[in-house]
Image: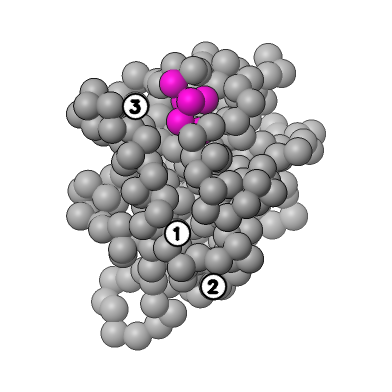
Amino acid sequence: MRRPLIAGNWKLHKTVAEALEMVTTLKKDLTDVKDRDMVVAPAFTALASVAEALAGSPLALAAQNCYPQASGAFTGEVSPALLRDVGCRYVIVGHSERRSLFSESDDFIRQKVKAVLDEGLLAIFCIGETLEERNENRTFEILEGQVDAGLKGIDKAAAEGLTIAYEPVWAIGTGQTASDDQAEEAHRFIRDLLARRYDQDLADRTRILYGGSVKPDNVDGLMAMPNIDGALVGGASLKAADFIRIVRFGKG
Ligand code: PGA
């Protein structure tokens, strides 16, 4: 009942020309894909050109970050309103690189989630434990804390615009993917938590993506798990052939 979603997070990669080359290939090679959602998240500088290139295609555009104010004296920042204006449908919020490298707090991330949803955009809200936290058996506690802090004050109607990305920090960019069972266990926990905080219906409809070293050779196993509804892909989304194979999970 949940439509799969595969999103490519390009991080700080690709000039406008490189981004356009990539989406031209994706558009051409993925025209037949109708049963899953596909999203690319270029750097801010390529959003406008990529939006134009994607017009009329099944691929949707995401931003990698935003600032939780509509406008004002916030030098260097970009609001959800401006992202919608440029053609974004999704915004990634709370990525672990934002949390660790840029010291983003749970409360700041909550403001961003709210601002994105208030603007009518879809939030891809990222959560995940570090290796140390996993080794201390604190994974569920960390996930629960991040969900509760990040979604505080987000009512059920607003939460309809939410996709969760479970991204264990130790698996991001390391080549060390969570096993299918480790990922499924965390996803089931998150879905049960959504059911407790909202209701079962919303929990059953909310997509929970896995992220962290998703590659062509591990995507099929992950996507076969009942509570894994898609992937947030970093490194492997930079190469067209790899991303296309990931989008085509389960189809060989
Ligand atoms: P990775 O990144 O696929 O390179 O591990 C995932 C992410 O950061 O979203």
> Which of the numbered marks, if any, corresponds to residue 118?
2
Label pair 3/2, CB-CB below 8 angstroms? no
Residue drawn at x 69%, y 32% as measured from the top left: 29
Is the distance from the Cβ of mark 1 to the nearest ligand 1 atom less than 8 Å? no
Residue 11 position, x and y percent, is: 37, 45
Gap in Å between the C-alphas at discs 1 and 3? 24 Å
First in sequence, mark 1 or 2: give its number: 2
Give the quadrant of residue 157. bottom right
Residue 129 covered by magenta stretch: no
> Which of the numbered marks, if any, corresponds to residue 151?
1
Gap in Å between the C-alphas at discs 1 and 2? 13 Å
**Who is closer to the viewer here, 123 or 249?**
123
Residue 167 position, x and y percent, is: 40, 36
Task: Judge whether residue 233 can be spotted in this image.
Answer: no
Residue labelled with disc 3 = 171
In the image, the segment drawn in magenta is: 182-187
Residue 239 position, x and y percent, is: 49, 29
Name which residue type carries label 3. Answer: Ala
The local crowd at label 1, few if under 14, some if 14 to 19, many if 20 or more residues have their Cα within 10 Å, is many
Q: Nearer the viewer, mark 1 or mark 3?
A: 1
Give the quadrant of residue 213. top left
Name which residue type carries label 2. Answer: Asp
The local crowd at label 2, few if under 14, some if 14 to 19, many if 20 or more residues have their Cα within 10 Å, is some
First in sequence, mark 1 or 3: give its number: 1
